[in-house]
């Protein structure tokens, strides 16, 4: 079974890529679902402010690898009979945690889009939309406080997401070809 973790800045296309993996039968495990579910249980709205506060609380309680740690059992269970796509690898510590648990089975896929492209997408997003200023602030926080640049730098493969959804699908197909070639080595 395959385990692929997608890393990228907010608005870079992680969710769209995850959907493409789901379309070919992968089980999607979105790290952010933990935040969403806990906020709903607490009766709080899914806002940037509420999400950030809860993410920080969870990382304070469980360490910077919190989301990987809290999803470990779900990942292991799914890998028993299905390929898994992890949507939303964020920190260097999450990367190290997953690499330690799964070794060479883990493939890290980065998705990249330039900041201005991402900000435009985030403004137009139906769910979790952000203003340009909120997006810039989130970028800064993710880079400085989550060590997000490290797993992006260590990715096994990077998809450039600068065009249309059709272009993204073509780049996804190129990744799948690369993955098949890698497995044949």
Image: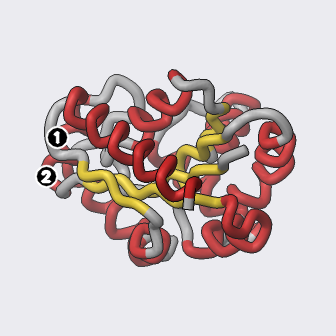
At a point 51% along the width and 22% down the height, the residue shown is 23
Provide residue 132's location: percent of width, then percent of height: 20, 49
At a point 66% along the width and 74% down the height, the residue shown is 96
**Quadrant of image for the C terminus:** bottom right
> Is residue 177 left or right of 88 when viewed as pictured?
left
At a point 61% along the width and 69% down the height, the residue shown is 95
Compare residues 135 and 91 and report the one nearer the observer: 91
Provide residue 77's location: percent of width, then percent of height: 86, 40
Provide residue 84's location: percent of width, then percent of height: 66, 41
**Quadrant of image for the N terminus:** top right
> Which mark identifies residue 116?
2
Tell me the element at label 2: helix
> Is residue 12 left or right of 70 when viewed as pictured?
left
At a point 60% along the width and 46% down the height, the residue shown is 86
Compare residues 43 and 116 and report the one nearer the observer: 116
Q: Which residue is mark 1?
A: 120
Cβ atoms at labels 2 and 1 below 8 Å apart: yes
Kindly indicate the quadrant of the structure image that contains residue 106.
Answer: bottom right
């Amino acid at each position: 079974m395959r385990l692929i973790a997608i890393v990228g800045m907010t608005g870079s296309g992680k969710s769209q890529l995850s959907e493409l993996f789901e379309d070919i039968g992968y089980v999607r495990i979105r790290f952010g679902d933990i935040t969403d579910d806990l906020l709903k249980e607490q009766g709080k709205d899914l806002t940037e402010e509420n999400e950030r506060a809860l993410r920080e609380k969870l990382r304070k309680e469980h360490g910077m690898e919190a989301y990987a740690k809290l999803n470990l059992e779900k990942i292991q269970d799914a890998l028993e009979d299905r390929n898994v796509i992890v949507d939303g690898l964020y920190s260097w510590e999450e990367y190290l945690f997953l690499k330690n648990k799964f070794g060479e089975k883990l493939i890290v896929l980065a998705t990249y889009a330039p900041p201005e492209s991402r900000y435009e997408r985030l403004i137009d997003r139906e769910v979790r939309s952000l203003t340009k200023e909120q997006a810039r602030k989130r970028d800064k926080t993710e880079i400085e406080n989550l060590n997000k640049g490290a797993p992006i730098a260590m990715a096994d493969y990077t998809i450039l997401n600068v065009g249309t959804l059709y272009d993204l699908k073509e780049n996804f197909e190129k990744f799948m070809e690369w993955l098949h070639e890698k497995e044949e080595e």
